[in-house]
Amino acid sequence: MATHTELNPIQVSLLRLFNRPMSEAETLALKKVLVDHYSDLLEKEVSKVVAEKGYTQKDFDDMLNSEN
């Protein structure tokens, strides 16, 4: 697997924006914003795939209960 070391423009911008002292509460609040954002993206992607594949609750139950 190739390792990518360059920062993209948004990463550089974020480093500049947060190049200041921050309390633990501020740090946790920012982490929550990022986690919530990526959680929403993941939920939308999973919903899209479930709809495209036509999965039902029975399909998920079968997947969870299979031995493979």
Image (cartoon, rainbow, N blue to C red):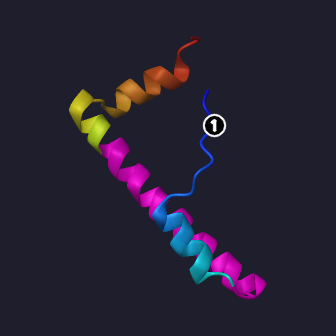
**Residue closest to the eye, 57 or 32:** 32
Q: According to the image, label 1 marks what residue? A: 3
Q: Which residues are the magenta region?
A: 20-47
Residue 54 seen in render: no
Q: Position of residue 41 (x, y in %)?
A: 39, 55
Point 35% across, 45% down: residue:
45
Q: In this rendering, is residue 28 above or below 48?
A: below
Q: Dividing the image into 4 quarters, which one contains the C terminus?
A: top right
Q: Position of residue 27 (x, y in %)?
A: 69, 79
Q: Disc 1 on helix, strand or loop?
A: loop
Q: How many marks?
A: 1
Crowding around mark 1 (Cα neighbors within 10 Å: few <14, some 14 to 19, many 20+) is few
62 or 47, nearer to the observer: 47
Q: Depth check: 47 or 7 in front? A: 7
Tell me the quadrant of the picture where the N terminus can be found. Answer: top right
Q: Quadrant of residue 14?
A: bottom right
Question: Residue lying farthest top?
Answer: 68
Which residue is more in the foreground, 44 or 68? 44
Q: Is residue 63 above or below residue 34?
A: above
Q: Is residue 3 above or below residue 11?
A: above
Residue 37 place in picture, x, y as percent: 46, 65
Asked if residue 40 is among those painted magenta in the image, a careful observer would answer yes
Res 66 seen here = yes
Amino acid type, label 1:
Thr
